[in-house]
Amino acid sequence: MSQKPHEEKQKDVLIDPEGYRHGVGIIIVNSKRQVFLAKRIGKNAWQFPQGGIKGSETPEQAMFRELKEEVGLLENDVKIIASTKRWLRYKLPPHLIRQYSKPICIGQKQKWFLLRLVNEEAQFNLLETDDPEFDSWAWVSYWHPLRQIIWFKRQVYNMALKEFAGKVLSKRFWEQ
């Protein structure tokens, strides 16, 4: 497996020397310019689909894997409209850092993807894997997730939504 020398592997997930796990975030938008938001199993916690980059995956490969695993959508159900220009980072609060894990992960750095749902008949399936993360989902207005997301991820959500707003809220959205 090819890894940069300064990156270490933890259960096939990359963690950089600063302690950030490499991951992807996914914003799916429908024809009404609403975004897909999912509720974590057994919690009143809502978020966009996201997950770690494994092994030698590219961010795009990881995004399509997570899309299938977390919400049951296939590559042909969506179209990539954009990805963030840079990695967006958040730190975990101290009580969520697993001190026993080596290397220690202090947060995530994520490449975010904006996807347009092109197959309006696509079937979302939150039970695609043996270990589902979500038990409910909803289409919500574009800025609504900022009111729902847990505090330590809010800045990353704000940066991703702001970066993509010009594309989603543009009159030319469907030309993309």
Image (cartoon, rainbow, N blue to C red):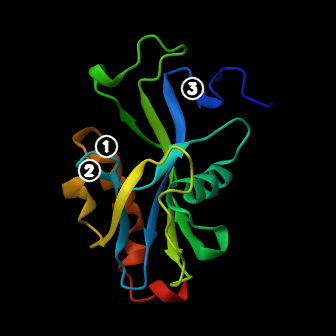
Give the residue drawn at x 37%, y 80%.
Answer: 33
Residue 87 appearing in the image: no
Gap between marks 1 and 2 measured at Cα: 7 Å
Residue furthest right in the image = 1
Give the residue drawn at x 22%, y 49%.
Answer: 44
Give the residue drawn at x 26%, y 50%.
Answer: 149
Quarter of the figure with the N terminus: top right
| Residue 75 in picture, x, y percent from top left | 65, 68
The three-letter code of the residue at mark 1 reads Lys
| Residue 8 in picture, x, y percent from top left | 64, 21
Proximity of marks 1 and 2: CB atoms separated by less than 8 Å: yes
| Residue 129 in picture, x, y percent from top left | 57, 50
Name the mark on residue 149. Answer: 2
Gap between marks 3 and 2 measured at Cα: 25 Å
Gap between marks 3 and 1 measured at Cα: 19 Å
Q: Nearer the viewer, residue 167 or 134?
A: 134
Query: Which of pointers 3 and 2 indicates the residue nearer the eye?
Result: 2
**Compared with residue 88, is residue 92 higher up or lower down, i.e. above or below?**
above
Give the image quarter of residue 63: bottom right
| Residue 36 in picture, x, y percent from top left | 38, 67
Tag 1 residue: 153
Q: Nearer the viewer, residue 50 or 164?
A: 50
**Compared with residue 171, is residue 15 higher up or lower down, i.e. above or below?**
above
The three-letter code of the residue at mark 3 reads Asp
Tell me: 122 left or right of 173: right
Tag 3 residue: 16
Query: For numbered disc 3, what is the local secondary structure?
Result: loop
The three-letter code of the residue at mark 2 reads Ile
Query: For numbered disc 1, what is the local secondary structure?
Result: helix
